[in-house]
Image: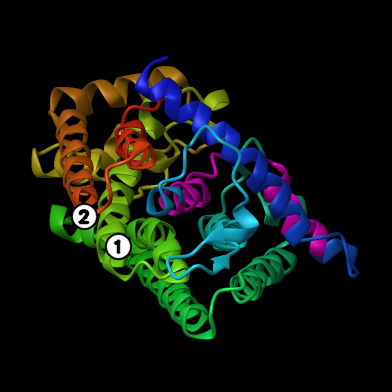
Amino acid sequence: MSELGGVEQALDHRRGHINDALLAAVPVEKPERLHGAARHLLKAGGKRLRPALLLMSAESLAAVDPDSPVDYHRFPAADGGSADVLAAATSVELVQTFTLVHDDLIDDDDVRRGVPAVHRRYDDSTAILAGDVLHARAFELLLGTGASPERSMRALARLARTCAEICEGQTADIRLEERSQVTVEEYIDMIDRKTGVLFATSASLPAILLGHEDAVDPLASYGREIGRAFQIHDDLLDLTTPTETLGKQRGSDLVEGKRTLVNVHARQQGVDVDELLAEETAASVTDARIDDAVAVLEEAGSLEFARERAREFVERGKDHLDALPQNQSRRLLTDTADYLVERDY
């Protein structure tokens, strides 16, 4: 099996645990409409990269054989105790999902993960409240991992700060859309807060909860770097992957005027990005129009520029893993970093 095939198999295995835990974390309760809205995207599935990364990071710290059964609910800590790392993994995915619910509302998007966005399936007010439920439940779960009070408080503080940074990143994203010229550095700073920070927290939370102090900063740095790479690659996939595979309209970022590394670079090369899909909407744009726009961006060297920067971030992220014990789980983290910029969906 190829290294990327091995990563996909590892993700599939952990995704099963995570999906079960997510639905258990947000049960159907009264009022049913609110909790149904909160479960809407959870039931739609997803890659679950962040929670899977958390579980893999925990395994690397304990030198767990990735192919052996693991009790994630009582995962061994450095001092002989244990913590429920599956609860922590579920927590970060609930945070990720709450941001998607609110982002879709802010952007007025129609589809997420192949299903109607929460505000489309329900209504705007219910979507806001459903996101808030997911956010609150995330902290409740993280408080119940069984880690020591000191470690639990540090983990909670890390996740709280992460949520604030995500909001800062989203605000920066909105502000950048209002400007015709954006620098590469400004774009990287935006995705660092909007995307990279949750990857950093996902990778480092196990080290906090399990008492591996020396690994907290290296894992956070690893996660932040590969999170940046993940976002850049996601921007590329928006242009190159069919709508049915993406689970949303291909080219929607370009139609909506979102700032991505591709179009930031293209503008610097003199491309009038706003005219590429002028007067199109996500509902009306055709594959032929998107193909023409992508050809212009390719000619400007903008797609290759983005690919190279994503690969640079991955290599920098992998370098931080040198601080971890050499074992099979650490190699899986290395392969996962490569997977994030080589996946096709």
| Residue 215: assigned label | 1
| Residue 293: assigned label | none
Gap in angstroms between the C-alphas marked 1 and 2: 7 Å
> On the image, which quarter does residue 275 sit in?
top left
Is disc 1 placed on a helix, strand or loop? helix
The number of discs equals 2
Visible residue check, residue 183 = no
Q: Position of residue 141 (x, y in %)?
A: 65, 70
Q: Position of residue 19 (x, y in %)?
A: 68, 45
> Between 311 and 14, which is closer to the camera in this rendering?
14
Q: Residue at x 38, y 16 (%)?
A: 2
Residue bearing the label numbered 2: 323
Count neighbours of disc 2 (C-alpha within 10 A) and say few if under 14, some if 14 to 19, many if 20 or more: few
Q: Residue at x 21, y 54 (%)?
A: 323
Q: Are marks 1 and 2 in contact (CB under 8 Å)?
A: yes
The residue lying furthest to the front in this view is 80
Q: Give amino acid for label 2.
A: Ala
Q: What range is drawn magenta here?
A: 35-58
Q: Position of residue 27 (x, y in %)?
A: 82, 60
Looking at the image, tell me whether mark 1 or mark 2 is earlier in sequence order.
1
